[in-house]
Amino acid sequence: MALTAFPKRGETCTVTDMDGARDIPARLKGASRFRFGMRIAARAGAVAVGLLVLGFVAFCTLIIDQPGDIGRADGIVALTGGEARIPEAVKLLARGNGRRLLISGVNPATTRQELVSLMPDTRMLFRCCIDVDKVARDTVGNANETRHWMEKRRFRSLIVVTSSYHMPRSLAELRRALPNVELIPYPVKPRSVDVHALWASPATLQLLASEYVKFMPALARCVIAQVAHNRGVLGGTRRCLNGGNTG
């Protein structure tokens, strides 16, 4: 059997045996293998970045600036942390869209009187129909405290009031905590955030990118909870991405 010695990268070796001569690819040297591995890693990285970008774009499509026809629900929850969330929730309560309101995530140092002073005309509502949660520190805590509140009052439907960009993550966390409750989103559009012009606003782009990073683990937790309720991965994912539906 004859074999050519020391072939260069990209060349072939001629091997002769009883079946005749044939060419086989030359083996890559150590440096060549390293460069080949780097090219594979670069391509894999490009694919990963592309998927992240596509996921971010898909996340932005979940953000709705204006509420739809919300109708009536058993309860209303306002998640603190953004402008106009509490006043909008109180207006819904005053209009009869819900029987009771939970304001979740209030600073422990804030008193009920301070909240009332922000909306003096709603003093009677604070006395009869508004509960204040000072335990929750983040969206996960909001969802858990809302679950306790809903279970205590045996409510089966809930209007969710929070900022538009925060709504997808809020619904995912609430769907995890309340898998069998009807969720009705009521997004509040912040004046400083314009989803439709996010590429022209670095501040908005940064805010939504940060929210997207937080949304992904929330979505994963929601899907796991749905699978635990025998809804399957695909069915659970649809419910978590469309948190306003229970069907």
Image (cartoon, rainbow, N blue to C red):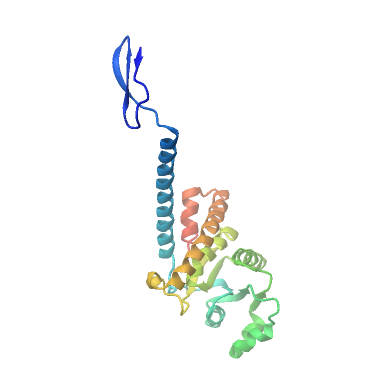
- Residue at the extreme bottom: 120
**Residue 82, percent from left and from top:** 55, 76
Of residues 58 and 238, which is closer to you in this image? 58
Residue at the farthest front position = 6
Count of labels in the image: 0
The residue lying at 60 percent from left, 76 percent from top is 101
Which residue is more in the foreground, 213 or 158?
Answer: 213
Q: Is residue 167 visible?
A: yes
Q: Is residue 247 visible?
A: no
Image: 92 above or below 147: below
| Residue 197 percent location from the top left of the image | 38, 72
The relative height of residue 156 versus residue 15 in the rendered view (above or below) is: below
Query: At 63% across and 89% down in the image, what residue appears?
Result: 117
Residue 231 on image: x %, y %: 51, 50
Asked if residue 206 lies left or right of residue 75, the reply is left
Q: Closest to the observer: 139 or 239?
A: 139
Q: Quadrant of the N terminus?
A: top left
Picture quarter containing residue 61? bottom left
- Residue 83 x %, y %: 53, 79
Q: Is residue 80 above or below residue 39?
A: below
Residue 29's image quarter? top left
| Left or right for 107, reference 219 | right
Q: Is residue 26 above or below residue 247?
A: above
Residue at point 44%, 67% (across, down): 63
